[in-house]
Image (spheres, coloured by chain):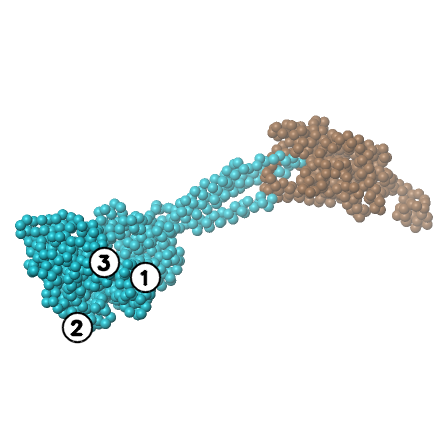
Amino acid sequence: MSKTTATGRAGTADPRRFLDPTVVGGLERLDLTARLVAEGFLTGLHKSPYHGFSVEFAEHRQYMPGDPIRHVDWKLFAKSDRYYIKQYEEETNLRAYLLIDTSGSMLFQSEPAPGAAAHPSKLRYSISLAAALSYLLVQQQDAVGLLTFSDHVHRLVPARSSATHLRLVYREMELEARRALTGKGITEKTFDDVRPDVRSGSGAAPAASAETAGPRTTKIGANLDFLADRIPRRGLVMIMSDLWDRDEAAVLRALKHFRHRQHEVVLFHVQDPAEAEFPYREEGIFIDVETGERLNVLPWEAAKEYQRMLDARVQNYKRACAEQNITYERVLTRTPYDVALLRFLEKRQRMH
Amino acid sequence: MGPFAFLNALFLAGLAAAALPILIHLFARRPARDVVFPSLEYLREIASKRVRRVRIKQWLLLALRVAIIALFAIAMGRPVLQGNASDLTRGSSTVAIILDNSYSLGASLPMDDPRQGEAGALLDAAKQRAEEVLGLMTDEDRGLLVLAGRPVSAPFQTPVTSLGLLSQEIARAEIVPGRADLGAAIAQVTPVLAQARTMNKEIFVISDFQQQDLEDWAKGATPRGTLASRLGLIGEAYADSGVAALVLPEGVRLYLVPVRTTAIDNVSIERVRFDPAGSGGRGRVVATVVNHGVEPVRDRLARLIPEVAPDAVFSVVPGGRTDVEFVLSQLPSEGAVEVRLGSDLLEYDNRAWVVTGEASTPRVWVVSDGGVGGAGASGGAEFIATALDPLGGGEFFQVRTVGPDALSDPAGIDAQVVVMLDVPRLSDQAVESLGRFRARGGGILIALGERTDPRYYNTQVLSKLSSIELRNVVRDEGAGTYRTLRPIIASHPAFAGFGLGPGEELGSARYRQIIEAHAGADARVLAEFSGNLPAVVEDNGVVLFTSSLDGSWNDFPTSASFLPFVHQLVRSLATRAGADRAALVVGSVLEASLPQGAVNPPVTCVDPLDGRTAVQTTPIDALTRLRAPATTLPGLHRFVDDSGRTVAAFAVNLDPTEGELSLASTDLRTRVFGRAAQQIAAGETITRDLLEGRYGRELWRWILGLVLLLLVAETLLARGRALA
């Protein structure tokens, strides 16, 4: 499979790529790559783990050749000596919601290690992953919806299962990415374009606003909690976020809220290699991409403690998710998203 | 040095390098670059917890780095901390031991000396003192040994750390037959000590500190321009006054360790000569004996070896001298005899040698150009010839009267002495012949007269044979002026037998004419007339009598002293070659000039211990000049040619001044060595005195250890960054 990522250009680190007309006009590319990934999975004779997921029994119908044997109601056969197939209410209507964090921190993209391929931003990575999942779901007649959020919910696309709806989802993903990029830049090279006030040294973080220029701030817990109440019926909720929210408890409560409403939750903890491994060696002025806050950091003094704190958060989420029967997946953006996706799907396949 | 000092202060310039870490911190730091990061949530929290700790750590690292460089520079400067002396705080030392092994240290210890049972001679006692000095040294110290007996020698050119080696060389040191040269010995060690990089630098002079040695030194016996004076050892301020003060390099301490504090009575042979014509033809040996002690010497025995004469008995008053005469019954077959005195505490100077050679009456040529003489009708030459051989049988001298032309005869001058009486002219050949004659040991007596032209003699004769110059003619009218003749150098062989002291009269006579003579650089006045007119002037075998000997200018021949005076003068010239050889002391170069053909080269010098060295032979005109290196042994030395024949013999004796065993006073020692020299009394141990002088501790090791610890600390403290 091609290593072409959703960005369209392997190794490109320029966040303006989203504004590139060829990319913007190439929604089909997202569709195409997502389709390729999903079909690749399917070609590998992997069955969707989400097929027939709903457990609510609706009625019986008479068995017809070609029906899956596993759906035969053997108890009824024992009673009636006839073959009947169980039909479930939502058998062909799994509702999946993709919740994508579009806060400023998701736009972060570090320089690749020498000799290594470039990796995308967390947002682009998440979008690519979500796009592939969307395709897979729609292929199997499942409905997919999209919600984006940062400090508030930005977009809500209801769950539908048509191909047209899928294109709509892709478009919204791209639009959201573009909107998230308003202000142009999330790397050191372009940061002065993004945050002229930060570059001047004021360091003051502006008030969060969905429509103001500049990276969005994060309120994961609050927004997830909000969404938990608004997603109708139960379904599959796949959250893609870097989980940079100080209020971990709020996030975990929100996740619990989803479970309380009978949703299955998959949490993709998307991380850039730099924030996961903290490879910095030289003294630097670290700038918070969301708030613009500046901090003089001696990496050799901070690395160990940072790693400990990060590992603690990861373990905390793992443990909490396990307790709530939530799937927790930690992915690094240097891992090609298709590889990450296939690993995830295979794991799911084994579990079910 | 103050309480805290540096041995290598130059290295302290390295302290400037301690500013490097500060400069690097200030100017070489790269500005922190901007790093965009997703969230400062964790970093903020970490920074708030650790910022103070990080700052302290950074300052500590800077301080450590500055301290490491500074301390290293200080350690290189070799700091020393001075304080009260004890074994715990001793610093390293460079010690020079100057051991006097001149022959005065060969004196036995007096019976009443408490060290009598432990050491036989003074040198043994001196070695014990040297071992005491070694006993104070440790493995950190370095030592140097110099033996001060002439010639000054040193087993090691640079200080050694092996105390065993030093002890071995001290034990091996032996008495040398020479005087002590403490000045040269000190001059040899001071440059080494000046360059030593130890805390302590010490010189120990272990000697008997003879008065004569120090007086010679104090009087500037070390000539200007020598190494010793160039080193500033003889203080310029004192040199002109004749008093020397030793100036030592900075930081060098001097300790004087006398090996005896009491005088030792000693009798020594000052001089010995052989008179071949004395007492009937066999010759006699006369030894001049000196009593250096304070007690009279009575009836002490003196003997000749081989015993070719009966033993003699002599007595000498304290401070006096006497001649001991041996009349030879036969000539020794070796051609030399040894005079040996009875035992005293210093045996070395109780022996002396003299070459006897062949005993025959000297042959004398009386050269005259004829003319009217003085007394007698035979003319001047006949007059002198009769005076020298009155009986005509050659009992005293074999005299031949010749004219000036005989001097030009290529056959050479077959005589030991040529007496020139009023010879008006000499050919160039004759003058050259006289020069060769003089060079091979012959003696020339020149007497003036009416026909003597002073100007001619100055330009054609005297200037070619000597440095004597004739000047004014002193003429007294009438019968002349009574003038006395008195020796200036009473000990000269020309006056032997007269028993005169300096200033005493030999005789008087009327003198009508005297030519005033000037003694040049190499000449000396042996006797003078009253009125301070030189009478007898000598220059290396040429003797000038400044008046006439034939009675033409004076009535000296009528004086009772005339005959013995002429005899002794001629005899002293006749034995000049032998006398010169008898005056050799240890350290003299042996030289002899012999007619060509008389020697079959190669020639070897055989010393008293039968050691052999090559003799340099050089043909000069009709002579062969033989020369051997400086002697190191007293006794009989012989030049032996290829046929095994002894062609020349030399009697080499000790320098008699070393036999004067008087001790230098404390005042004299202070004058010579300076007030800074510490004089250790004989009864005091060196240990106690020395520890009071050694003090302090070198700190560089401690500081380097501290630098090492700081380096480890810096590495550990900075490790976090390296591992990050």
Residue A157 location, quadrant: top right
Chain for colour cyan:
B
* Sequence order check, earlier mark of 2 and 3: 2
Dots 2 and 3: beta carbons under 8 Å? no
The percent position of residue B472, horizontal first and vertical second, equals: 14, 47
Say which of B65 and B397 sits in front. Answer: B397
Q: Colour of chain A?
A: brown
Q: Same chain for marks 1 and 2?
A: yes
* Sequence order check, earlier mark of 3 and 1: 3
Dots 3 and 1: beta carbons under 8 Å? no
Q: Badge 1 local density, few (<14 within 10 Å), some, or many (20+)?
A: some
In the rendered view, does B586 fall on the left or right side of B445?
A: right
Cα–Cα span, label 3 and label 1: 24 Å
Label 3 sits on a secondary structure element that is helix
Q: Amino acid at mark 1?
A: Gln
Q: Is residue A320 visible?
A: no
Q: Amino acid at mark 2?
A: Ser
Cα–Cα span, label 1 and label 2: 36 Å
Label 2 sits on a secondary structure element that is loop
Q: Same chain for marks 3 and 1?
A: yes
User: Which chain is home to disc 1?
Assistant: B
Q: Which residue is mark 1?
A: B616
In the rendering, which numbered label is found on residue B433?
3
Cα–Cα span, label 2 and label 3: 37 Å
User: Which chain is home to disc 3?
Assistant: B
Q: Which residue is mark 2?
A: B329
Q: Amino acid at mark 3?
A: Ser
The percent position of residue B558, horizontal first and vertical second, equals: 6, 59
Residue B681 location, quadrant: bottom left
In the rendered view, does B567 fall on the left or right side of A342?
A: left
At 32% from the left and 65% from the top, the residue drawn is B601
User: Which chain is home to disc 2?
Assistant: B
